[in-house]
Image (cartoon, helix red, strand yellow):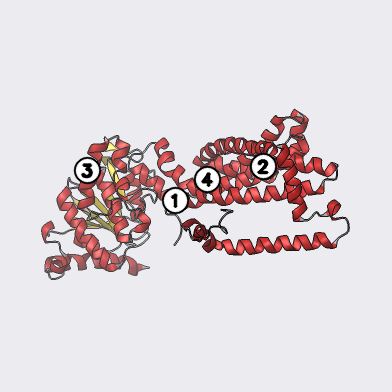
Amino acid sequence: MSSISVARPDLLRSARARRFWRHGGLELALVTLLALALWTAISASIARPDRYLPSPVSVLDSSRDLLWKGILPNYLGQTLWRLVTGSLIGIALGIPFGILVGLNRTVSEMCYPILNFFQSISGIALLPIVMIWWGTTEKTVFAVVLYTCFFPIAFSVLTGVRSTPRIYVNALRTLGASRLRIVRDVLLPGAMPSIATGARLSIGYAWRAVIAGEMLAGRRGIGWMIFSAQQVDRTAQVVLGMALIGVLWILLDRYVLRPIESDTIQRWGLVQR
Amino acid sequence: MYDGEFAAVVGPSGCGKTTLLNILAGLLPYRHGTVQVDGVPVKGPGSDRGVVFQEHAILPWRTVARNIGHGLELQGVPRQERRRRVREFVELVGLAGFEERYPHELSGGMKQRVALARTLCANPVIMLMDEPFAAVDAQTRITLQEELNRIAIATRKTILLVTHNVDEAAFLGDRCFVFTRRPGRLKATVTIHIPRDRRIWKEVVADPAFTARRDEILELVRAEVRVE
């Protein structure tokens, strides 16, 4: 986290650093180092590593070039922008849809297989048909990200609403609550943990869909960077792109999505202790 | 039932006591007969009939105070007034100091106190209780029964309690309606003439007026169980 921590040992003892080391930070650092060492060793032992598997050092080296030209930040920004807008809109549409469908048992039983069906068709499998409709446009990538997000979250919310205990609904009815108040006071908070988990799942799928969409629809971004680098034999750049995807996801998951998820679940007091 | 009465419905398991209560609450439709509250026939649930359920039906994502004030919130009672009434009922059920706690931080008995306060706070015409103390331990149950009696005195509510616990029915009821086994029908009505302020477990167990009535109900219920 803080790169100057070695130079200033007092930072190592700060509360944040202590928390990091206590929560598996040491293990993470060790495993990362081990993986990098293994990668370097394999790279050194094969013929023509530049073509087949460049070492971590040369991958880093290639990123310096891209950074300097401003290409990397530009691509990163585009990819993240697509992810954020596509998944936010997908989630914003999926939550009310899941609740509406979940209100009625007959409707939800009818919709369940349909939602399950679409949930199984990944964004990549949807891309070809969307490309037939809209070609290699921004709209295509956006549509695929939105689609990828919508179904997992709608599915989770539906399950969450259906699994909210009936007794809460009955209790509110005897207190004189209207249908709308039951949704607001019981079903929505009852589905909250499912919403948090579903959102995390959705964004995970969307992350893959953005990359795939950029590759196939040829829109500038990290996905496109990997794809075009492969065509001109810049293997270091390909590996760099892959590493970025993984690292960005870990950061996003650990510092944004997981905290939101555990926060809602804990605050709601729904953790079985 | 007459105004301010405490009625207990007692009968063997599965005789339809809970079904009866759910019909009265308006949660289940009924085919024959009529259910009226102050002359108005029941069509679906309403805030004139408050229900205390067997399981914990308070919302886990609301604090004690917000659970208790939920009924008033739904009735559109302004915040100031709501806060005043919530405080009153928090004290009535002995939960002062726990207003900002969440249900998962409370014991089973305390959760039922919250449920009781929530129902009373909404000020229903009649309070329906479905085996409210079945899920708590024996000591807590005795305490809660005495407190319910105290609350019945303090609020003068009309209360209908459904239970399979004969002691509980005899201890709390002004009239006990004994049901037959399935299909449940009214078998007998036992009236218990013990003043409310003398209904304390330590006293009633030594009171022949109580023990005689209780044994009478017990025999009526046991006869139903034995036929099987």
- Mark 3 or 2, which is nearer the eye? 3
A52 or A168: nearer the viewer: A52
- Mark 1 or 3, which is nearer the eye? 3
Please say if B93 is above or below B46.
Answer: below
Q: Secondary structure at mark 2?
A: helix
- Mark 3 belongs to chain: B
Identify residue for label 1.
A165
Q: Say what amino acid the circle numbered 2 marks.
A: Phe
Quadrant for the C terminus of chain A, please.
bottom left
Q: CA distance from mark 3 to mark 2?
A: 50 Å
A39 or B129: nearer the viewer: A39
Is circle 3 on the same chain as circle 2?
A: no
Identify residue for label 4.
A195
Q: Say what amino acid the circle numbered 4 marks.
A: Ile
Instruction: Determine which of the numbered discs, if any, sits on residue A118 in the image.
Output: 2
Residue B106 horizontal/vertical position (percent): 33, 58
Instruction: Determine which of the numbered discs, if any, sits on residue B85 in the image.
Output: 3
Q: What residue is rendered at 30% in x and 60% in y? A: B109
Mark 4 Cα within 10 Å, few/some/many (few <14, many 20+)? many
Please say if A157 is above or below B8.
Answer: above
